[in-house]
Amino acid sequence: MKFGHFDDVNKEYVITAPDTPLPWINYLGNEDFFTILSNTCGGYSFYRDARLRRLTRYRYNNCPLDSEGFHIYIKDGNIIWNPGWQPVKTPLDSYCCRHGLGYSVISGEKNGLSAKQEFLVPMGNNCLLMRVTCENKSCISKRFSLFPYLEFCLWDALDDSSNFQRNYSTGEVEVSGNAIYHKTEYRERRNHYAVFWANRDPAGFDTSRDSFIGTYGSPAVPDAVISGCCKNSVAHGWQPIAAQQFDITLGPGEAYSLIFGLGYIENSDDDKWEEPGIINKAQARRMISEYDSDEAFSRAFNDLRDYWERLLSNYRISSSVEKLDRMVNIWNQYQCMVTFNMSRSASYFESGMGRGMGFRDSCQDLFGFVHMIPERARERILDIASTQLPDGSAYHQYQPLTKKGNLAVGSGFNDDPLWLIAGTDAYLRETGDWSILNESVDFDNDASLAQPLIEHLRRSFSFTASHLGPHGLPLIGRADWNDCLNLNCFSEHPGESFQITGANEGPVAESVFIAGMFVKYGKAWVDILRHMKLDSEAAEAEAAVLSMEKTVLEHGWDGEWFRRAYDAFGHVVGGRECDEGQIFLEPQGMCVMAGIGKDSGEAEKALESVQKYLDTKYGVVLLTPAYTRYRLELGEISSYPPGYKENAGIFCHNNPWITCAETVLGHGNRAFETYSRICPSYTEDISDIHRTEPYVYSQMIAGKDAAGFGEAKNSWLTGTAAWTFLSISQAILGIKPTLDGLLIDPCIPADCKGYSVSRRYRGAVYNITVKNPASVEYGIKEIRLNGDICHGNLLPVLPPGETVDVQVIMGA
Ligand code: BGC
Ligand code: NOJ
């Protein structure tokens, strides 16, 4: 069952029923100011950091669900309704939500009156804009009132939702003309305030929630709206809000629009006040005047469209498969950008108060983003690297505001260092900007320890190489990619964090997965060293990689698949002798991607086992059989009920590893099958089962052992976005940036007749057409570059600005 449809021309998902299985959200904002907005106008705004600079309140796990946001109420005679349906939930005559790239348009109609809310965060300004357009579609004149309403957060979202003895007394506002200023704590240590404004004069306002909603009222029946009259309240403490009232009369066919804004302003410490106690509003006034007309609003809209058009033009496919094209051209890339901006901080499943930027997460996010804005990728790599510790290990997380490593979580996740090589390698292959390796970068944010970036990569590699366990496999530390496989944790007490309890390091527990990573990204490191003409170091690194490959085949191979790990007692995890958790997905994906056992047959067997044991109709599960009881020696993984999350859920992040692995062996049919199984546009038809947004990936889909098999959770912020983009754009469609140019190497379903891709690469445009007349899955017969036969499948790097035509014929 569907609740809407894709509009590919406008690059929108159009939701046609407000009561979607879960709130379906969008992200507005690309730089510093962000808003999360659901299809019924729920959500919140923040500046840079969703915890420390939260502008509006949002109550997670609230009941009713998703009722705080950017609602407007319309009182038309005795009928009160919202264009976005919530929170009054008056049945609408029509409803529509269009989530687009960086904007959303939500409209409703009731009794001959339509109202449309258009939301966007303009480029280059720290505000959310909302244009409201009402139209009288009836044949009689209508007189109605319109009330926008939002609830301010007292800045620190965590404190705001816990420290009531203080913050019930601190709230302060100022009302001036058409604007309401939220200035809590501005009198003391803050130099910033928020402003909510309208471009027309309201008939009244409220800034106290008790006054607008009623102390025992509800957003579904606000006192002021019921009585048709705001009370011009000024909040002192308690719950400051912004609400206004507009009384509007429209003749038949007449329309009326208003523009609202919610802005964030910082003043310097010596320029905070206009007069004693009156905040300096100069910047706010400038912001307000910038968007006071329909033309100004439309201009902001067009700028945003142009911005996205430019970003998405770097990789554009045209095939005859519309479900594929819309994901590659629009939604997958869009999600990559959002994930890059948000890391794992703020979604409808991430409260914005928890984790900062993950070291491994941010490195992997680069894969999906680097082709769009390489400059920001460069900056991100340097930020991440400066939180690395001098021995090559890494803080697991860092804070986006301070860019400092997070001491509370610390280090000890032994896959982290290698992801830095992976991310930097992706950047080098995309840009050819070798200068990044010479950038001086702090260790542990300490300038006195700074070294060129290449030294950071070197220490990443040698950290893994020098932390090996009894079988010669890398020690796992707290955990590897799978945060929940905690082999040195042994947590017995409720509430202890699995991520930081127990030994930071253990001398025995080893990871076959990290071994796979070491081979895969170790090979990338060798290529980088060769390119830098550091030949003897390259030879040494290569020897370490080859020896690890042997070790994996000797101690990490179980007969039919790659083992997962050895626990702290040296027992196998993910082997046939285990009663549960016999086979895991991650080492099959990573080891085959690394090419381990490719020539000797183990790789083929491993992928056969994935298909035989782990595959389901909704995607590949992380392990099987699921753990049915808690196991002290394995940690969090066994804490989840069977089928959920890391305990045999369909963890979407590593499904594309299998896709990529299949292409390493030339299995185009199977690669596309694993791609499409979890692909949102392919699962749109089962939105009632899947429940999360049909235009983006979720972190997890409940696996076959779960009661809710097929139900997705944790949408939007997941490494799935970047890895899927890599798997489809590079592994399947076969357009692979390398250190020396674009490599053409498709691996596609045999029945695919062909496709074309326009790819901007290092400033030049490659218009590539792939044809598959012999219905093969893999292999190239001929490539022509501007009509001339090309030797091999590596396209040369062209001068920026140039456009070339590339004709590829697949075949034997
Ligand atoms: C989740 C993991 C996550 C970890 C770290 C766990 O509860 O299951 O997916 O990586 O927390 O925050
Ligand atoms: C989500 C985390 O953000 C990521 O770092 C981790 O690899 C996966 N969960 C698997 O545990």
Image (spheres, rainbow, N blue to C red):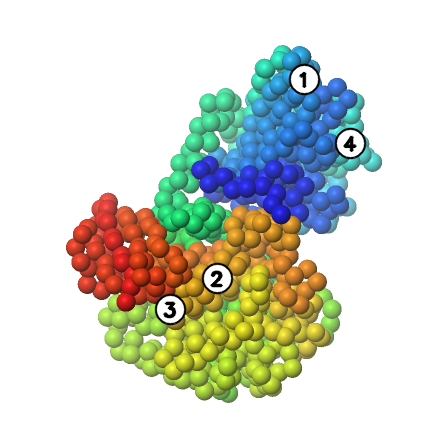
As measured in the structure, the alpha-carbon distance from the residue carrying label 2 to the one carrying label 3 is 13 Å
Question: Label 3 to label 1, Cα distance in Å?
Answer: 66 Å
Pair 4/3: label in front: 3
Q: Secondary structure at mark 2?
A: helix
Q: Nearer the viewer, mark 1 or mark 2?
A: 2
Can residue 17 be seen at all in this image of the molecule? yes
User: Relative to residue 811, is residue 510 drawn left or right?
Assistant: right
- Find disc 4 in the rendering and name its residue: 221
Q: Position of residue 545 (x, y in %)?
A: 37, 79
Question: Residue at image x 65%, y 22%?
Answer: 113
Circle 4: residue type: Val
Residue assigned mark 3: 666
Label 3 neighbourhood size at 10 Å, few (<14), some (14-19), many (20+)?
A: many
Q: Real-space Cα distance between discs 4 and 2? A: 49 Å
Sequence-wise first label, 1 or 2: 1
For mark 2, what is the residue? 673
Residue 126, x across and y down, in percent: 51, 36
Say whether marks 2 and 3 touch (CB < 8 Å).
no
Comparing labels 4 and 2, the label whose residue is closer to the camera: 2
Residue 191 at x, y percent in the picture: 57, 38
As drawn, 361 above or below 371: below
Q: Residue furthest left?
A: 788
Mark 4 and mark 3: span between their CA atoms? Answer: 61 Å
Quick check: 44 left or right of 222?
left
The one nearer the camera, 410 or 149, is 149
Task: Tell me what residue is drawn at x 33 percent, y 78 percent.
Answer: 542
Label 1 belongs to which residue? 247
> Which class describes the residues within 10 Å of circle 2: few (<14), some (14-19), or many (20+)?
some
Instruction: Tell which circle, 4 or 2, labels the residue nearer the N-terminal end.
Output: 4
**Kind of residue at badge 3:** Gly
